[in-house]
Amino acid sequence: MSAWDFIKHAIANVGSVGDRASRLEYISLLGISLLFVVGPSFYFLNERTFVFSNIATPLIAIISFIGFLLAIPFWSTSLRRCHDLGWSGWWLLLSPWPLLIVLPGETRTNRFGPPTHDIKGIYANAKSRSMRSAIKEGLNSLYWLF
């Protein structure tokens, strides 16, 4: 599976916080989130960009907005990654980000569900899913917010 498939799975399962997320899913979403959140800030670090151009400023704003929209799937995936380690989601209040990347998940079934090491099980339909359907499933899974 590619990183894109993991990102589609994370977006489609944004509302299912009771499941588990693999390390690859977490790292893929972390990388794309950093690209969209931190990437535009490098544009503004250049001293010549204080005079904004007509094209670049809206483009950077759109990229930053996409990064903002990825915040909810990132927090959901972080919570599910804690579940993969056998921890409660409340550990996110202590910000254990490096541990979520480094530590392998539990290989046995824990109180949050079966292990994610079985790629064919939990990520079975991620390859065939389009990004549009992943977003639609993600919005449908957030029904409890509204």
Image (cartoon, rainbow, N blue to C red):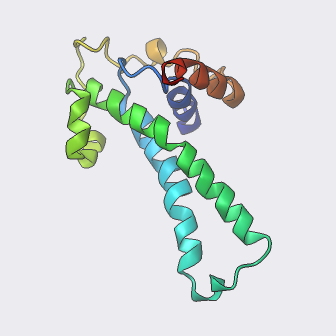
Give residue 103's position: percent from left, percent from top: 23, 37
Coordinates of residue 2 in the picture (x, y in percent)? 55, 35
Residue 23 picture quarter: top left
Badge count: 0
Q: Which residue is drawn at 47% across and 49% down?
A: 31
Image quarter of the C terminus: top right
- Identify the image quadrant of residue 53: bottom right
Q: Is 63 or 27 nearer to us in this picture?
A: 63
Position of residue 112 in the picture relative to residue 67 (left or right): left
Residue located 80% across and 74% down the image: 54
Q: Could you tell whether 42 is left or right of 19 in the image? A: right
Tell me which residue sits at (66%, 61%) in the image. 61
Instruction: Please say if 26 is above or below 129.
Output: below
In the image, farthest residue toward the right: 54
Report if residue 14 is visible in the image: yes
- Whole-percent x and y of residue 141? 53, 19
Q: Report the front residue among 125 and 136.
A: 136
In the picture, measured across the screen, residue 29 lies left or right of residue 127, that is left
Across and down, in percent, residue 138 comes to 57, 24
Work out whether 83 lies above or below 99.
above
Query: Could you tell me which residue is drawn at 37 percent across and 18 percent down?
Result: 19
The answer to whether any part of residue 24 appears in the image is no
Q: Which residue lies furthest to the bottom in this view?
A: 48
